[in-house]
Image (cartoon, helix red, strand yellow):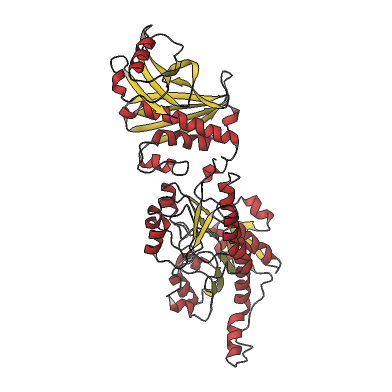
Amino acid sequence: MAPVSIKTVLISESVDPRCKTILEENGIRVTEKQNMKKDELIGEIKNYDGLVVRSATKVTADVINAADNLKIIGRAGTGVDNVDVDAATKKGIIVMNTPSGNTISAAELTCALLMSLSRNVPQAAMSMKQGNWDRKKFMGAELYGKVLGIVGLGRIGKEVASRMQSFGMRTIGYDPITPPEVAASWGVEPMSLEQLWPQCDYITVHTPLMPSTVGLLNDETFAKCKKGVKVVNCARGGIIDEAALLRALESGQCGGAGLDVFVEEPPKFRPLIDHPNVISCPHLGASTKEAQARCGEDIALQIVDMVKGNKLVGAVNAQVLASTFSQESHQLIKLGEAVGSVLQSCTTSKRPINHVQITTQGDCMKSSAAYMTSSVLVGLLNHDSGCCPNLINVLSLAKESGIKVNQTHCASDGAASGVCKVEIEASGCRYKASGSFQGGVPVLLELSDSVFRQPVSLTGNLLFFKASANPQLLSSVAGLLTTEGVEIESFSAPADRSGDLWYCVGLSSPLRDLSALKPLVKEAAQLTI
């Protein structure tokens, strides 16, 4: 991946000072403006290449669409619920978070709430402050020997498991991504949700908020749980249905709840907050000095690493970029874009494109399939899309345009290694091109069945034209170009000498009017690479 140019960053919330220091030490100008309203942020954001937020700033589609220069949105924390990732992706903006910055802090708060639920610590402390001495009222239960169900076995779920196992709890869990053998290696017994619900004395959730997790704990699931089950949510408000939780608390089906997050923050659903068996916190999961320092430092270091072209960490919408930091990947991306650009210029009059088939060949391209596909599409769509395509947004732009994209990889057939073949269908016509690398330069090997005797170097001003084989063709084209004040720098002809074939001429400057070639050729296209 070529380094991304980030010269200015806006920090819109209170972030650890190390964040600003690290960015400025690496030549990035930083502006801190907190507590901006939406309209103020929309007016301000156009001046910056990067934006760093925590959880209060809502980076909506309106904000993103006003950000003409924005290249990265960094969330100093876990999750990106306050960022419209789809809108950012469509505009080609990288969204990243600090996935491990607040892991320990969130895990420790979860454990604190589990312990507080078991021994009624906050209620007892409040009673003491009121001058009471109610030992019997706050009878608790041991955690030892109890079953803790962990829904979501990512970083935080894993840390909660290890800590609560030290209390002698049996830990069971569900996660659709973490392999069962990995969960088992942490001492967590993996199982389905249907198996988990009825076994738990305590349940803690550690999932992102998405359609499949909204209301994960609801009337139906509470009914499947043990009577008196206690629940904790330090992840995202909405994973537990708040109205269903209140009903379960009032019926005794739920024996208590520890809540750090809410559907609406600050919460307005007071009957839940005021329930005597609810322990609530004002979203303190990441509110430790250590977590804030770690998140602020991590997001700054991640941005700097990306800018310097070292690595990409924490990106939630740009996984394709993770393997694009080697010199070889830079060359392959240039090749893909160049081949795509050739086909784009040769099919301008044949739009729209319906289908793209990309085939990579050879061992050197085996691990490059994802970014080769995207780079070819960048070249193909570079002059078609309303917004500038890049490796981040091009797949979604192709989908919006109704283009079906297929990608395959095959081993070298012995004749060629490290080849990218592209075939497109546009308005019922098929065009194809294949390219490779020679001497560190991308070259075109073939264009629509015209295999070039000498590969075409894909640099500079290139004129492609299709014409019938004719001994006078080159001299006629050369004469016309001379008349137009353009010099020929190179000429590539196909190996075959029969039928309508594609030729390529390297030019000193682009031809002002392609229609001047009409008397000599059947099709013509030019581009500058």
Percent coordinates x, y for residue 131 in the rendering: 60, 93
Q: Residue sitting at 31 percent across and 23 percent down?
A: 514
In the rendered image, the residue lying farthest to the top is 471
Q: Is residue 117 left or right of residue 56?
A: right
Comparing 264 with 504, the one in front is 504
The quadrant the C terminus occupies is: top left
Percent coordinates x, y for residue 50 in the rendering: 49, 54
For the image, the number of numbered tags is 0
Q: Is residue 80 left or right of residue 101?
A: left
Whether 94 is drawn above or below 345: the answer is below
The quadrant the N terminus occupies is: top right
- Res 171 quadrant in image: bottom right
Whether 309 is drawn above or below 8: the answer is above
Comparing 156 with 365, the one in front is 365
Percent coordinates x, y for residue 397 in the rendering: 39, 42
Q: Residue sitting at 46 percent across and 54 percent down?
A: 48
Comparing 310 with 409, the one in front is 310
Whether 287 is drawn above or below 213: the answer is below
Whether 421 is drawn above or below 369: the answer is above
Percent coordinates x, y for residue 289 in the rendering: 62, 68
Q: Residue sitting at 35 percent across and 32 percent down?
A: 353
In the rendered image, the residue lying farthest to the bottom is 131
Residue 497 shows in the view = yes
Residue 101 shows in the view = no
